[in-house]
Amino acid sequence: MSKFTTDVRRETIEAEKKIRDSIRKTPLQYSPYLSKESGGNVYLKLENFQVTGSFKIRGAINKILSLDDNSKANGLVTSSTGNHGAAFIWALRKFKLKGTIFVPENISSAKLEILRLYEADIEFFGNDCVLAEMRAREIAKETGRVYISPYNDPKIIGGQGTVAMEIEEETHGIRIDSVLVPVGGGGLISGIGGYLKETREMIKITGCQPARSAVMAKSVKAGRIVEMESEATISDATAGGIEAGSITFDICEKYIDDFILVSENEIKEAINLILRKHFMLIEGAAALPVASFLKEKERFQGKNTILILSGANLDPDQLKDILSRPF
């Protein structure tokens, strides 16, 4: 019996109606190179072309639009390593609202610069996204403001699930065998898996994480949310722990078929590959599905596989380092 009550598919369908005018319907692009590498058909879902450069705008808009006027008027609080924060601020500006973002002190310089360009109210706390998240929740409770979670909320999950709705439309008549999704707190894969698996049980949903911060993978394996220290990773958008009691853990337990963990070098090589073969910039988290696919490409032979390229916000210094490497 499921331990959660969130109807992900229903939340996703409702979210799509709310947010369709505020987001981009991103392309699903065929990859000749990756298809040849695997002997199958590989498609890239280009959330790196999304508003603010990542999928996060979907959930942020949906959550904010679900609030009543009084809640919105009091001001909002969130925590973020960058992408959710940019989406949060973009939504605040669009709807003329006020809010504060709590970020870990080790946030990437590129993503911090983006937040500052939006003239965000930023507070620094701790060296892990979970610590920043806990502090943001404390402040929200003390001030009576609504906390907007980056992942632990049915409305956020429903918003992220609209990625799967678009995939369903874009692959009309095509059998989907596997979907590879980057995983941090689990909001994106909860939405995608919860939407697709309810009507297409045979689809394999694979979670992709950096070996240096595989909290969800290890938590699912242990049957509980584990506390562990994450190492630095270029996939900073998926780094860090999972909030205690997060609904995403139960959803991930139900819908994720397996995990693939990849090294830092494999992630960087995937970023380089997408730039060279598709002339597109992706960030570390978006490279996780590509790196995971290449690591275990034999298992996708003859399959129709979709890789979720979740964002494009890569630190320029990291890109410079990657381009200098002889892959």
Image (spheres, rainbow, N blue to C red):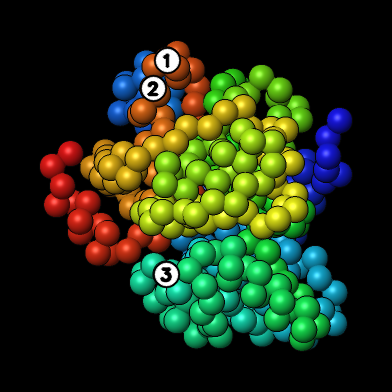
Q: Is residue 93 visible?
A: yes
Secondary structure beneath label 2: helix
The answer to whether the residue labelled 1 contacts the one labelled 3, judged by CB atoms less than 8 Å apart, is no
Above-or-below relation of 120 to 270:
below
Q: CA distance from mark 1 to mark 2?
A: 7 Å
The answer to whether the residue labelled 1 contacts the one labelled 2, judged by CB atoms less than 8 Å apart, is yes
Above-or-below relation of 62 to 135:
above
Secondary structure beneath label 1: loop
In this figure, which residue is indicated by the disc labeled 1?
301
Say which residue appears at 43% left-offset and 57% top-offset. Answer: 236
Mark 2 nearby-residue class (10 Å; few <14, some 14–19, many ≥20)? some
Indicate the amino acid at tag 2: Lys
Q: Is residue 90 visible?
A: no
Label located before the other in sequence (2 or 3): 3
Indicate the amino acid at tag 1: Gln
Q: Position of residue 249 (x, y in %)?
A: 69, 44
Tag of residue 106: 3
Quarter holding the N terminus is top right
Of badges 1 and 2, the one in the foreground is: 2
Q: CA distance from mark 1 to mark 3?
A: 39 Å
The answer to whether the residue labelled 2 contacts the one labelled 3, judged by CB atoms less than 8 Å apart, is no
Say which residue appears at 75% left-offset and 49% top-offset. Answer: 247
In this figure, which residue is indicated by the disc labeled 2?
297
